[in-house]
Amino acid sequence: MYARTRNALLLLLGRRRRRFEKKKNNFFQLTTTTTDEKALFLTTTSRENERFAICDLLPPPTSRRNTCASLAEETRTRTTVSAMKEDKCRETERNDGVFPTKRPTLPPPPGFDEVVVEGQGKVLQRENEVFYNRPQVVNRDLSLAMIREFQKRRKEEYENETYQKTRRGKGMYNKVPKESKIIEYLVSEEERERMFASKKEVPKKSENDAKKDDGTKQKEWIEVKPGTFRWQVAGEEVKETIPKPTKVEEKKKEEEEIEIKTEKTPLEPITILEGMCATGLRAIRYARELDDVKCIVANDLDPTAALAVENNKRYNALESEEVKARVDKIVTNCGDVRVVALQHEKCFDVVDLDPYGTPSQQLESAVLAPVEGGLLCVTATDMSVLCGNNGEVGWTKYASYPLKAKYCHEQSTRILLAAIQSAAVKNRRYIVPVLSTQIDFYARVYVRVYSSAVNCKSAASNLSYVFQCVGCDSFELQPLGRLEEKSHERTGKTYTRFMPGKLSATVEHNEHGDRKCHNCGWGMNVGGPIWSAPVHDKQWVESVLKDVKESSDERYPGKEKVRALLTNCSEELSDSPLHYCLHSMAGTLKITPPTLALFRSAIINAGYKVSGVHCNQLAVKTNAPSNVLWDIMKCWEKEHPAQEDFKNSKSPGASILKKEPIVQAKWTRVHGAFSKAQMAGETRFPTNPEENWGPKNRATGGRSNKREIASCTAPNTKNHRKQAKKK
């Protein structure tokens, strides 16, 4: 029975092999080998002679019935492998297609479960061997839009001659090793020669020259011109004096130099570093969807991820010659991103850092890799730390103490910006944020990096400490530094002085010696420092938003959420750090909250600005002080009174209600109480497309989930104690 089933299997496989060989452009070719009777090999060949191979060993025959059943099942599986892969692709496309994607043109090779399609990028996936997270499609779409805007701004700056030239270290100050395999893709050959140029050795002098250099040199008077004599060494050539050029000649020379300068060399394409590439989906999308790209370095510390990138490059290259030329710009590198960034200082136009967790360990080196005015993109997914659940851990990672408050999500982006700034100033560099967002379960910031010692000194004025009341929602900001413009006594010229921040004159203390909240009288906690300067560049955001609106759904699979996010960011107040939550303020007073439109109208009628927040649909960002907001809420409480028992208690809300409001609220609705998106009927906070739309498990790297890592079974660990109890 075993022999008959085996012969039937080989016969059927032979038929399918002949049928596949008849096709000229087939991708998969099914072959068999007879070296081992219990082994079946599936080998795929391509037009580029690239091979994927997988060996599925059949279990030893325990009985005739089990053997026949297993071989029959294996026969059905192997003979229909291509159809199954295509059906799985369709099923994955149908079930997994929350965002509109382009259907893959080629089925996955044997050994891979599915083909993940996002935009124009396609990657092969096998269980959880390499990390891939679908919810980050918004992250990748937003990064593509920001890089396109960066290319546009970079070109304008180059044409307007405001483009800052990058000065790299040369000779002994050059940090790039000569054996680097990446540097040849990043800079030109002439630039590499200048970078690796060393001090030339002085040639040894001949005997005749040595004799001339002795003190025995004889000088004499030599007639240079008729009637003109010069005291010089005998036998030395007479050097004619060159007359100084006239002013007219100098002007002509300057005009010629200007004409030479006007003939500019074309702007070189950008270079991109993806520090932690995993499957390489982001790098592949950059290569296939971005224009004017010179090189994309896809780096990862895991060798499995580096191999996955190479497989995905080959798979995408089979689509067409144009796609092959684009993905060939991807240079795979297996190493630590910190070493890559340190060894290639100021060599990348765009640096993308998207780690699994905190980026704090990579920030010190990441700020050195971008060129002058380069774009640095950083993601942080440790939101529990940045939102104040583990404040002490936040201090160890980001040198900032996060507070657990209603503005914690906005606080996460500002702490991340402060950490990047702190890492940059140590290397005489500073940052200019262009977009800072908090999306779902992570924070994502985009900053431009420059070098300037003067601007590094003024960086302290962009940071502030936060004083948060423990009883109510009031908070105050204490700037870390300030700038003062002064004029010189004698010359009258103005200059800037860098001064420490001033403490507010209205600071009061309670009976415990703590800083007292002037609204409820309770104590205050100190957090930060955080980034208190603007976190968005409105021109950037509006330009990117326009590009997203005019683009198709295929260009940005997560277009709806990206558009809503950019719309909210474009309407935020830039000079008002952090925000208030309307429902939390009403909860402090134990009253029913007013509608958001009424509350915002009352703030505008009081003479202040107000806007929404991109990370909280019930939040209010305003430049009004906290006492004005509480006065408005007290006016609302008079129309919708709280219970008398609560007013007589010692709670923070009761202390606030005991004070009469100074500002009288006007509840007349105004046009500015509604955002532009609301007036246009656009969705501002779209819901997630499915449940559990959040972070996924860490990649196994080819290991089984049940297999334990040696470090996890060390003594005094949780797994070790569990094993000890079982024994």
Image: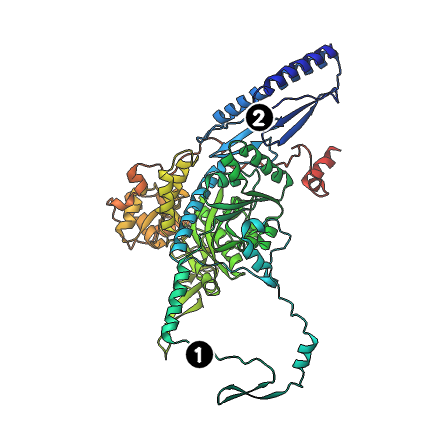
- The spot of residue 471 in percent (x, y) is 43, 51
The residue to which callout 2 is attached is: 27
Q: Residues within 10 Å of mark 2 (few under 14, many from 20)?
A: some
Q: Residues within 10 Å of mark 1 (few under 14, many from 20)?
A: few
Instruction: State how far apart marks 2 and 1 are (Cα).
Output: 77 Å
User: Mark 2 falls on what kind of element?
Assistant: loop
Mark 2 or 1, nearer chain start: 2
Colour mapping = rainbow
The residue to which callout 1 is attached is: 243
What residue occupies the far front of the structure in this picture? 226
- The spot of residue 199 in percent (x, y) is 62, 66
User: Does the image show residue 574?
Assistant: yes
Choose between 711 and 257: the one closer to the eye: 257
User: Does the image show residue 123?
Assistant: no
Amino acid bearing label 2 = Phe
457 shown above or below 86? below
